[in-house]
Image (cartoon, rainbow, N blue to C red):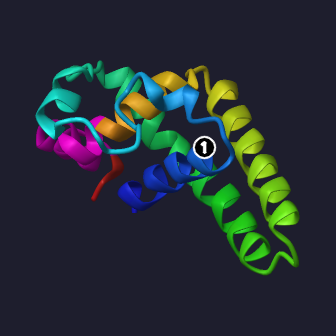
Amino acid sequence: MIRITSLALALALGLTGAQALAQDYGSGEGQQDPGMEQSQQPADFSDEELQQFVDLQDSIGEIREEYVSQIEAAESEDKARQLQQEAQSEMVSAIEDAGMSVQEYNAIAVAYNSNPDIQERVDEMAGE
């Protein structure tokens, strides 16, 4: 569940042109060597940071669910883009309201999907 939700945020950010928020953490166009990309990511996060990430998953998931069907049903590309921007804004607000930056959230999401140690720690905290 966490992997899908994290990926949903990354996709939402990328689709709305806010890729710059995650750019420093290897979410570019996939042209880099994966080993090089991984070495640029911070690999060690405190338990507090990871717990914040885990706690945010319900909020991010709810926002994602709220917007996915609306975006898919949008009558035009412009309307879909507008809905994506609204979803992104709500996700960013949820992250910042929890006391975390979008950059920190994205760094953990990237590490979760590429670092088995981080994935194991997050999954344990999430009770999976």
* Image point (27%, 47%), residue name: 113
In the rendered image, residue 76, in percent from the top left (x then y), is placed at 86, 72
40 relative position to 12: left or right: left
Of 49 and 103, the residue lying toward us: 103
70 relative position to 34: left or right: right
Q: Which residues are magenta?
A: 111-125
Q: In the picture, residue 98 is in which quadrant?
A: top right
In the rendered image, residue 46, in percent from the top left (x then y), is placed at 29, 18
* Image point (45%, 36%), residue name: 53
* Image point (56%, 35%), residue name: 19
Q: Quadrant of the N terminus?
A: bottom left
4 relative position to 45: left or right: right
Disc 1 is placed on an element classified as helix
The overriding secondary structure of the stretch rendered in magenta is helix
* Image point (40%, 38%), residue name: 27
Badge 1 crowding class, 10 Å Cα cut-off, few under 14, some 14 to 19, many 20 or more, is many
* Residue 18 covered by magenta stretch: no
Of 125 and 57, the residue lying toward us: 57
Q: Is residue 41 above or below residue 15?
A: above
